[in-house]
Image (cartoon, rainbow, N blue to C red):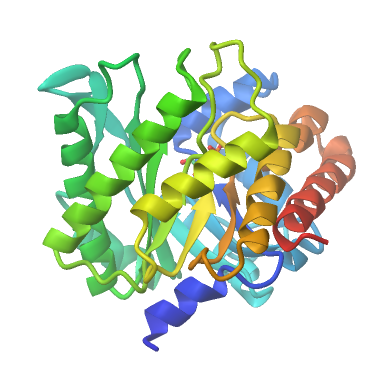
Amino acid sequence: MTDLVAIARSFFAHGKGILAADESVHTATTRLASYGISASAEMRRQYRDLFFGAEGIEQYLSGVILFPETLLEKGSDKKLFSRSLAARGIVPGVKVDLGTEPFPSSPDELITQGLFDLPERLAAYKKQGAIFTKWRAVIRIDGDQLPSAQALHENAKRLASYAKESQIAGLVPILEPDVLLEGNHSRTRARAVVEETLEMLFSVLDEQSVDRASIILKTAMALSGESSGKKDAPEEVAEDTIAALLKCVPRQIAGVVFLSGGQTPNQATDNLSAICRLSRAQEGTIPWPLTFSYSRALQEEALTIWKGEEENVVDARAAFLARLSKVSSAVSGT
Ligand code: 13P
């Protein structure tokens, strides 16, 4: 087994998963503002410290995805975040895409930028302690019109080029084609789009000869759109999500992680629990390990308590650990 494959598989240690803490400056600012916190660079650092500084997170976390600025920052213990996470057995990684822009051939859709100077940036992130990377593509559903085949293809090509560069740089790639929850589509439509997206992605990965064994897929679940008025039962989500994965994802990849995508913490936990239960029930037919790579669903309760105030840190961290414990149990079935 190569080092990259061993690292990729290590994220799926029993009951552990990945915290996505790689919000861009823009996303972090908007997120903090939604909790009444005005975000300076120092406030963003405290935001990261709130989560990384919580005692005991290593029971639940195998990895943390950082934003590039955070790779260079220190926690309240005066140690670089990447070092203190690694010292606790939590592998640090970094988001390497540079966000999205409208796709010229279909301006209502987005394509992800960041390939231009990627090799140089990967070399720098590696020196700064990153062991793995993430690239997010955004797929929007609008009736039967979107996503367009061209946008799916362009995003897949960029994901494949990124994955190849990351492997060349000696960094495990996490490929995130994020099929958005926004919209009034049915769960059946979401499942069809997840399938279309993954089929396109894996065919382009093969065309570009990307090594399958060291990649991790980060995917959305098959869910009814948030303005559809439909509440899916976790068992329905599990059935459609697992069916889509079984149809489209080659058995050789290192594993599959889920994003929370705007689900509430309880929904993201219950749906993950149903997915992992179904996967255990079908033992032998599900070829990859599964776990979480959540941002919003892990952070929401803690941020509501924190409000940017030092006096609330202890309680906010306790809420974060309580949610981590539930999400971890969802994966391990304990
Ligand atoms: P959510 O879990 O909030 O969807 O975030 C995951 C992520 O990494 C988005 O890029």
Residue 60 placement (x, y as % from top left):
73, 62
Of 91 and 128, the residue lying toward us: 91
Residue toward you, 47 or 323: 323
Q: Residue at x 64, y 72 (%)?
A: 13
Residue pictured at 29% horizontal, 38% vertical? 196
Spot occupied by residue 207 in the image (x, y as percentages of width and height): 12, 60
x and y, in percent, of residue 223 in the image:
54, 29
As displayed, is residue 323 above or below residue 216?
above
Quadrant including the C terminus? bottom right
Q: Is residue 119 above or below residue 22?
A: below
- Can see residue 259? no
Quarter holding the N terminus? bottom left
Image point (70%, 54%), residue name: 277
Q: Is residue 210 left or right of residue 308?
A: left
Asked where in the image residue 28 lies, by quadrant, the reply is top right
Q: Is residue 195 left or right of residue 58?
A: left
Quarter-wise, where is residue 178 in the image?
top left
Position above or below: 299 against 127: above
Percent x, y of residue 145: 25, 16
Measured along the vertical axis of the image, is residue 211 above or below residue 112?
below
Q: Residue at x 52, y 54 (%)?
A: 257
How many marks overall? 0
Of residues 283 and 100, which is closer to you in this image?
283
Q: Is 81 on the left or on the right of 117, as rendered? A: right
| Residue 289 seen from this side | yes
